[in-house]
Image: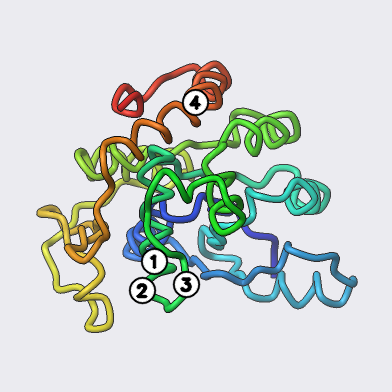
Amino acid sequence: MKWPDFIIAGCMKCGTTALRRNLKEHPKFQVYNETNFWLKNRREEDLQTYKMLFSEDKIVGEKCAVYYENKNTMERIFTHIPECKLILCIRNPVDRLHSEFNMKKRQGFKVGRFSSDKMWGPTFSHLLKKGLYFSKFEPIFSMFPKRNIHIVVQEWMATDTVNEINKVFDFLGAERIEREVKEVPGDWKDKHKVHVDGFYENWKRTDYEPMDKETRGHLVNYYTRSNQRLWELLRFEVKGWKK
């Protein structure tokens, strides 16, 4: 019985599920999915039950893509597990928004069209703010030691999967492993594909509602200031996010 060694705390539609699947392929890892445990205050008996999920002989963690959105949630984690390692997945916020919009649409939500004249209404407000990473990350970096925070860039993971996964293994203190090509589990075949080296990648769906240039331009401008402040915080920049 112990606390998790790491938590994948976000961000939604930035490759967190594919990352969790990759980590589970390593024999040393145990990764729970969406326990949502830290989204509210817990009693002492709840904390002890939560700790019973995690094996002593594994590198253990959980993934919840919305933890990063709420400062109180991150404070709860820090209060109880100050040395917990955090993984934060990021992606061009314009593409992140477009991806979540299409997910909501597939789920049956009445989200209308993905167009610039609808971006600023109540339907999109919450979705837009999820991509303002700096405002979410700044309090996290002020709480947790920087050595215990690892950023996964979805665009880099997609183009250099093996190297980026190995960086995560290194961060979590796990040995790198050789992988063989294998089939994706049946319920994942229409959502994910396997990288040539055996790692999972997000499957690029073909049923997305397209985004016109005007809408993309408005969104790039909307996120520019937040992105600039994020690069200052992280001390690196993802070039492709400027378009």
Residue 43: percent from left, percent from top: 89, 72
Secondary structure under tag 1 reads: helix
User: Residues at badges 1 and 2 in contact (C-beta under 8 Å)?
Assistant: yes
Precedes in sequence: disc 4 or disc 1: 1
- Quadrant of residue 193 within the rendered picture: bottom left
Mark 4 lies on residue: 227
- Quadrant of residue 144 within the rendered picture: top right
User: Residue flagged by tag 2: what amino acid is it?
Assistant: Arg
Residue 169: percent from left, percent from top: 39, 45
Give the distance between the C-alpha atoms of the residues marked 3 and 4, in whole angstroms.
29 Å
User: Residue flagged by tag 1: what amino acid is it?
Assistant: Met
Q: With 71 as the anchor, is 220 left or right in this view?
A: left
Give the distance between the C-alpha atoms of the residues marked 1 and 3, in whole angstroms.
11 Å
Is residue 64 at least partly visible in the picture? yes
Q: Nearer the viewer, mark 1 or mark 3?
A: 3
Q: Nearer the viewer, residue 166 or 186?
A: 186
Image quarter (top left, top right, bottom left or bottom right) of the N terminus: bottom right
Secondary structure under tag 4 reads: helix
Q: With 234 as the anchor, is 180 left or right in this view?
A: left
Secondary structure under tag 3 reads: loop
Which numbered circle lies on residue 213?
Answer: none
Q: Is residue 193 above or below residue 228?
A: below
User: Residues at badges 2 and 4 in contact (C-beta under 8 Å)?
Assistant: no
Q: Nearer the viewer, residue 96 or 43?
A: 96
Which numbered circle lies on residue 110?
Answer: 3
User: Residue flagged by tag 4: what amino acid is it?
Assistant: Asn
Mark 2 lies on residue: 106
Which numbered circle lies on residue 103?
Answer: 1
Q: Nearer the viewer, mark 3 or mark 2?
A: 3
